[in-house]
Amino acid sequence: MQDFLMLRDHSPQQIAGLLELSHTIKQRPGQWSSALQGKSIALLFEKPSLRTRASFAAGINRLGGHSIFLDGAEVMGKREPVSDVGSNLALWHEAIVARVFAQNTLTELAKASDKPVINALSDQCHPCQAMADLLTLQECLGDLGKVHLTWIGDGNNVCQSLMAGTALTGMHFQVVTPEGYAPDAALLAEAQAFAKASGGSVTLEHRLSQLQATDAVYTDTWLSMGQQRDADQLLRDFAPYQVNSALMSRLKARYFMHCLPAYRGREVSAEVVDGPQSLILQQAENRMHAQNAILVTLLNGVEA
Ligand code: CP
Ligand code: NVA
């Protein structure tokens, strides 16, 4: 494994290995406290973050490494080309964790850097989030091959990483979005091909009436970072897709998931996101364990 830019770049065996290692590191953190000793990681962010930034910083610290934070707006773009940022950061750091707008920025960083680059969210995908979510579902439901997950909302970055992640692990994933907010057609087709090989399934639907019963329902904000959308239009398009108690009951869903930040009363009702079915804190906690497994694998060549 050289970089961690998109889940589709990795085999089902690599994804399964990362999940196994995430469990091990979570259960026995002491064994990994020197894994990144003497190593430095650059955290380069073009967009705001709470969970990703804080969980990478804390996780790297727990592995005995050191991280520095760089504001992407300050160092990239007008000031100097992305390729110079990548080649320079690689001189002093063992890895670059980057949150960016364009997926292409990650590709350019990876090309210029001879050290691993990890995607901490782009407009296209959020693979670290998806790994934490798969870990959470394994903890709650066991064998992923038997798990049915439903996405309700905008089919962008988090949804697109979950499409690949669920397909590579043999899960059943139904995606429901309003018309005009579907995931990228090529990424959907690719996930469907992965699912065919793994025994899972990935489906896309716009009609809520067609939804099947599910183990867990996942939603995300209707307005992602950096998006310019008309607020009234957004409400008109998404309002019927709010996840609330009535929808959770109709789908017989045991769990609710959200990557956060969540907007109560918009994509999810407060009673659901703050209720007993909600996995939001377990997902957020697992960000660190999943990311530590990725770091250890990329930097030390450790596999589960
Ligand atoms: N879920 C997630 O990536 O949260 P942040 O945007 O706060 O990092
Ligand atoms: N879709 C959201 C995810 C935040 C973690 C966004 O891109 O803002």
Image (cartoon, rainbow, N blue to C red):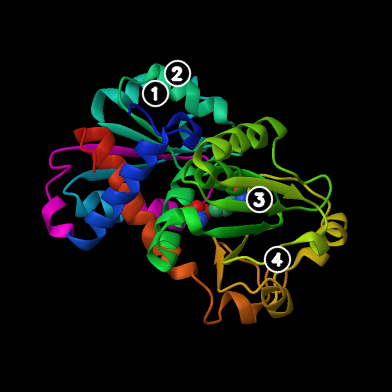
Q: Quadrant of the C terminus?
A: top left
Amino acid carrying label 3: it is Ser
Amino acid carrying label 2: it is Ser
Spatial CA span between label 4 and label 1: 37 Å
**Tag 2's secondary structure?**
helix
Of circles 4 and 2, the one toward us is 4
Tell which of 15 and 117 is nearer to you: 15
Write down the residue under mark 3: 224
Q: Residues within 10 Å of mark 4 (few under 14, many from 20)?
A: many
**Tag 1's secondary structure?**
helix
Res 114 → quadrant: top left
Tell which of 197 and 137 is nearer to you: 197
- Residue 220 seen in this snapshot: no
Q: Which mark identifies residue 25?
A: none
Expressed as whole percent of the image width and height from the top left, the position of residue 93 reads 26, 31
Q: Which mark identifies residue 83?
A: 2
Task: State whether residue 83 is above or below residue 275.
Answer: above
Of circles 1 and 3, the one toward us is 3
N-terminal-most mark, 2 or 3? 2
Q: Which mark identifies residue 86?
A: 1
Q: Residues within 10 Å of mark 2 (few under 14, many from 20)?
A: some
Q: Which residues are magenta?
A: 29-57
Expressed as whole percent of the image width and height from the top left, the position of residue 167 reads 54, 43
Q: Residues within 10 Å of mark 3 (few under 14, many from 20)?
A: some
Q: Quadrant of the N terminus?
A: top left
Of circles 4 and 1, the one toward us is 4
Q: Residue at x 57, y 66 (%)?
A: 216
Write down the residue under mark 4: 267
